[in-house]
Image (spheres, grey):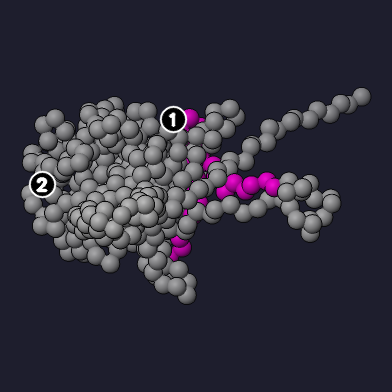
Amino acid sequence: MSTSTSTTVKKQKVLRVKWNRIEPVLKMRNENGDIKSVDEYNKEQSKDDQNDQNMENSDKDESKDEVMDEGSYSMFIASPIPRFYSAATSIKLPNDNAAMLLFGGYRNSILNDTFTYEYTTGEWSQNLVSEQVDQNTPQPRYGHSLVTAHDGKTYVFGGKIDEEQYLGDMFVFNHPNWSHVAQNNPIKGRAQHSMVAYKENLYLFGGSDDELLYDELFTFNPSTSTWSPIEKNSQDATWPSPRDNHSAVVINDCMYVFGGTDNETSLDELWKYEFSTNEWTKLTAKGPTRRAGHAAVSNQDYMFIYGGCDEGNINGAKYYNETWVFNTKTNKWRAVQFKKSVVKKEEQDASVQDEDLQLFVDELEPVHRSNHTAVINDGTLYTFGGFAIVENAGQQVFDDFDTCKLSDVVTTLNNA
């Protein structure tokens, strides 16, 4: 008598995230530079109107004089204008609250404005600088890197002014001021490179200038302001090809580099660099299609990428709004889908059929874009700006500021 056995295969749980949009903030500002929220301004106006009704004519005149001293207020958008090729990182403010720091980029012209977004209050603040750039003010640039080192200081390096002028200068941000860094053994200027922090140093990989793509790896020591090249262990050691517009994150004691462009061809390669051994390994896990200009962040043992485009930002390029996660423990990629809200039948109108127990309704769909910024704070991804060429609409530059809780995905993966 024969018996048959069956093996139960555990089905993977679908990974989903819900995206939310942080809308641009409107504020009021007068000629003196005084800034108020719209609510604060409206309350004060209502209070002034009430006082005017209760005051005698002489008092009214005095009150009007006081109001005129403040100057007339006008409404403005307190959040950053649309841009791409900017850079962002997380910092600690003087009040010890965490914030996103956003610097530079490109729209119709190159930018050198500095914004902070405080996560707990949801407030944007702009660090105003003199229109005349001095030695301690970074000049306008795009395609630069911005990294917070383990000493809490934030460094900007490189970028470009146009397709012929590439920058090799460095500045450090100590809220609310920038300061120029006098570099020892400076490296050649470049843009669209990656730079990460590991222990006490910064690590820069790749990038390009008007002549070359680079596969160079450098370390920068903030305590001595010194650059040092990292050479191959041997002449035939495995090493990534030259590239730019890629991403890099640090997880545990390794740096993971994904995608980018190699002589105008987008890449789908994922490389792991071990700091302790100075060894590169090309990982063969099947995952996202080739892309560049995406953004990447890390959370625990996982690397997340979002967006990007194929064909290196030329007309006809395909732009993505996908989110992927790479598990460094299993060396596997997983796609992360948009979450849809479940709406019960009784919450719908009468057109819903009785047999319908629930409906899925579309939530915010993240923008198809490239060359945006992304940071992570307390398990939540924050992504701003970006660029796309849209059929029948042409070039689009975004100021969309979207968030999603990646910690939910991490919890699901950890419990799998």
- Residue at 33% x, 59% y is 75
Query: Quick one: label 2 or label 1, which is nearer the N terminus?
Result: 2
Q: CA distance from mark 2 to mark 1?
A: 36 Å
User: 32 or 343: nearer the eye?
Assistant: 32
Q: Badge 1: few (under 14), some or many (20 or more) residues near its Cα, within 10 Å?
A: some
Instruction: Determine which of the numbered discs, if any, sits on residue 300 in the image.
Output: 1
User: 166 or 47: nearer the eye?
Assistant: 47
Q: Hey, which quadrant is residue 131 in on the image?
A: bottom left
Identify the secondary structure beneath mark 2.
loop
- Residue at 16% x, 33% y is 222
Query: Please, is residue 305 above or below residue 309 in the view?
Result: above
Query: Please, is residue 288 above or below residue 94 in the view?
Result: below
- Residue at 10% x, 46% y is 136
Q: Which residues are magenta?
A: 317-343
Residue wearing tag 2: 136
Circle 2: residue type: Asn
Circle 1: residue type: Gln
Residue 81 seen in render: no
Identify the secondary structure beneath mark 1.
loop
Instruction: Determine which of the numbered discs, if any, sits on residue 361 in the image.
Output: none
Query: Please, is residue 305 above or below residue 77 in the view?
Result: above
Q: Is residue 326 magenta?
A: yes
Q: Badge 2: few (under 14), some or many (20 or more) residues near its Cα, within 10 Å?
A: some
x then y, percent, for residue 220:
18, 36
Q: Is residue 42 left or right of residue 173?
A: right
Q: Is residue 295 left or right of residue 64?
A: right
